[in-house]
Image: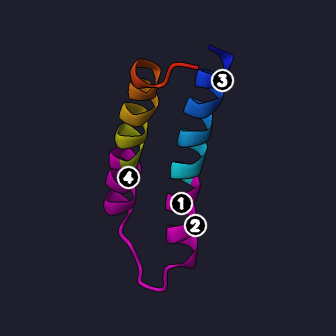
Amino acid sequence: MVANWWLALIIMVVSNGIVAWTLLVGQEPVSRRAKKWLFIVVNVIALVLAVSQFFWMDF
């Protein structure tokens, strides 16, 4: 069960890291509203993945 929590944490950290890296390295200016929605969408997807792994992964 602890492995499931670690995997959920890794999913959230990696997804937010990818978004942060994309926004920091990107050359095009991005509006504040677009950044907010990008973080919301990525975090919702990561949350769904993190929760779903509790049902499908059986350690």
Which residue has dot 1 on it? 18
SS for dot 2:
helix
Residue under pointer 2: 21
The residue beneath circle 4 is 36
What range is drawn magenta here?
17-41
Q: Quadrant of residue 44?
A: top left
Mark 1–mark 3 distance (CA, rounded to whole Å): 22 Å
Which residue: 36% across, 45% down? 40
Asked if residue 37 lies in the magenta stretch, the reply is yes
At which x and y percent is residue 6?
Answer: 65, 29
* Label 1 vs label 3, nearer the camera: 3
Left or right of 58? Residue 28 is: left
Give percent across and percent down for residue 50.
46, 31
Q: Which sits earlier in the primary sequence, circle 3 or circle 2?
A: 3
Does residue 30 lie above or below 2 as drawn?
A: below
Q: Which residue is mark 3?
A: 3
- Are dots 1 and 4 in contact, CB under 8 Å? no
The three-letter amino acid code for the residue at tag 4 is Lys
